[in-house]
Structure formats: C-alpha cells, structure tokens
Amino acid sequence: MIQIPFSSAFIARGRTQRHVMKLYLPGDTGQAICEKDGLTSMTFAYRDVPFENGTGYVRDILVGVCDKCGAVIATPPQSTPAIRAKRDKASVPVETNLPAIYIEALDLAAYRIDAQLTPDFRKRLLMYYLHDCATNNASLTKFLAASDQLAPIGKTSKLRKRLSLKVTARNQSEIEKMAQICDLNTTALLQKLIAYIHSEISTVEKPHHLKALRTLALVAA
Ligand SMILES: [Zn+2]
C-alpha cells in the first residue's frame, strides 16, 4: 500500500476552504489518487496503517480508502500527529562508555536546572543542546569553538560510566549529522556536548537557556 502525501494527493469534495482545518469523520468522502486506479473517489474510514518502513502499525487511524480497490490512499491532517508520534517512539539505542566525570557533569547541569530531576533527564538535556547546535548556526559556531574543560580530568580518570540512551529516529539523525560536522564518533561527540553543556549551565551565573530548560524539566517530570 502506498501512502500519498495528503497535501498533494487529496482534493476535498465541495467548496474549497482556505486557512481552516477540516475535521473529517468516518463516511466523509473525497477524491485522491490511487496508485492502481488513478484519480478516484474515496471514503474516510478507520484502518490499521502500516509504516512505510514496515516496522509496525498504527491502529485505528482515520484514513481515505479508495472506493474501487479498498487501498488506503490518503491521510487527513488530523491523523498525521498520531502516525508521527508512533513513528518517533521507535527508539534507537545509543550506548557509550564515558569517563565518570562527564556523567557527573551532566547530572550537575540537570541539578542546576531542577534539583528534583532524575537521570531520565540526561537524554532530554543532551538532545536539547544537540538539536540547538544542529539547527542554529550561532549555537553551532559557539559549540565548535568551545574548549572541553573536562578533558584533562577525563583523560586521567580510570573510572568510566555507561551512558545508555534510547533516542528517537529524529534524535539519531541529528547525532549522525553533528558527528559528521564535527568529524567525531558518537562517544567523542557526546563528550564534547557534555563539556559544552557543563560550560553553558554549571560554570556561568546566568545560563542562557535556563527558562526553556526548566519548562522542559517540568513537562518531562
Ligand atoms: Zn484503488
């Protein structure tokens, strides 16, 4: 079954309405392009929709079903977040072994944000800064220029600790993107990122992102 992007394939029946979002109901009709039947009429109904990569299904999602062959041929906007949420949940394990000082520095930064945070927040904190550096040029420049204040301690440290994260596919692609930009492997990138977080949060009087991070801590708890 081919899923066609809603915006390019689906033409709502009746008067075109711009700047509004229509909430579709089962039994509503429309037109879309079916791979087998071409432009065809369709009826909205609940179906289990497989992901394109075949890793599973989203159950009971309202979709446009081809009236001729029964294939799912369109996804209305209201169904898109559920499909995306399920796909984002698919977790990718990231396993690294770091000098203990890096894990401690990461937890210290979390403590500065909110003293009640648990190690679960490590991942969110890392991904927050990773995303900021991956999408904001000013942050990236600052990140690339930052020196690793933890490196001298890390190099002589005998104790290493496991950092075990389950990230979303989107997080994983940002890790890969940043590893490529910095020409580092995942472990070295995470060390550089933690050292950066340490310098941004724990060693300054007024951390730049503190308000946003406290909000993130609240919704994560
Ligand atoms: Zn069809």
Image (cartoon, rainbow, N blue to C red):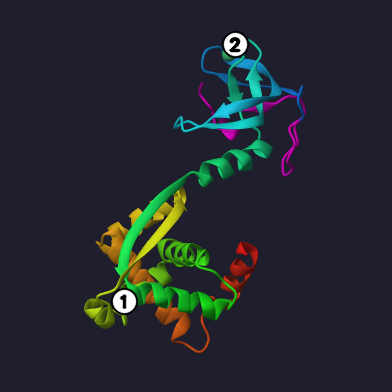
**Direction bottom: furthest residue:** 205
Q: Residue at x 54, y 69 (%)?
A: 118
- Spot occupied by residue 187 in the image (x, y as percentages of width and height): 30, 62
Q: Residue at x 23, y 77 (%)?
A: 155
Q: Amino acid at mark 2?
A: Cys
Q: Amino acid at mark 1?
A: Ala
- Spot occupied by residue 55 in the image (x, y as percentages of width and height): 46, 33
C-beta proximity under 8 Å, tags 1 and 2? no
Q: Secondary structure at mark 1?
A: helix
Can I make out residue 142 in this image?
A: no
Q: Secondary structure at mark 2?
A: loop
- Spot occupied by residue 9 in the image (x, y as percentages of width and height): 58, 27
Looking at the image, is 101 positioned above or below residue 183?
Answer: below
Q: Where is residue 188, by image quadrant? A: bottom left
Q: Which residue is mark 1?
A: 145
Q: Is residue 194 left or right of residue 216?
A: left
Q: Is residue 118 left or right of residue 18?
A: left
Q: Quadrant of ligand 1?
A: top right
Q: What secondary structure is the stretch in magenta mostly built from?
A: loop
Assess whether residue 6 is covered by the magenta stretch: yes
Q: Crowding at label 1, few (<14), some or many (≥20) Cα neighbours within 10 Å?
A: few
Quadrant placement of the C terminus: bottom right
- Point out the stretch of residues depicted in magenta: 1-24
Disc 2 C-beta below 8 A from ligand 1: yes
Q: Where is residue 77, by image quadrant? A: top right
Q: Residue at x 76, y 36 (%)?
A: 23
Between 138 and 166, the residue placed more toward the observer is 166
Q: Which residue is mark 2?
A: 69
Q: Crowding at label 2, few (<14), some or many (≥20) Cα neighbours within 10 Å?
A: few
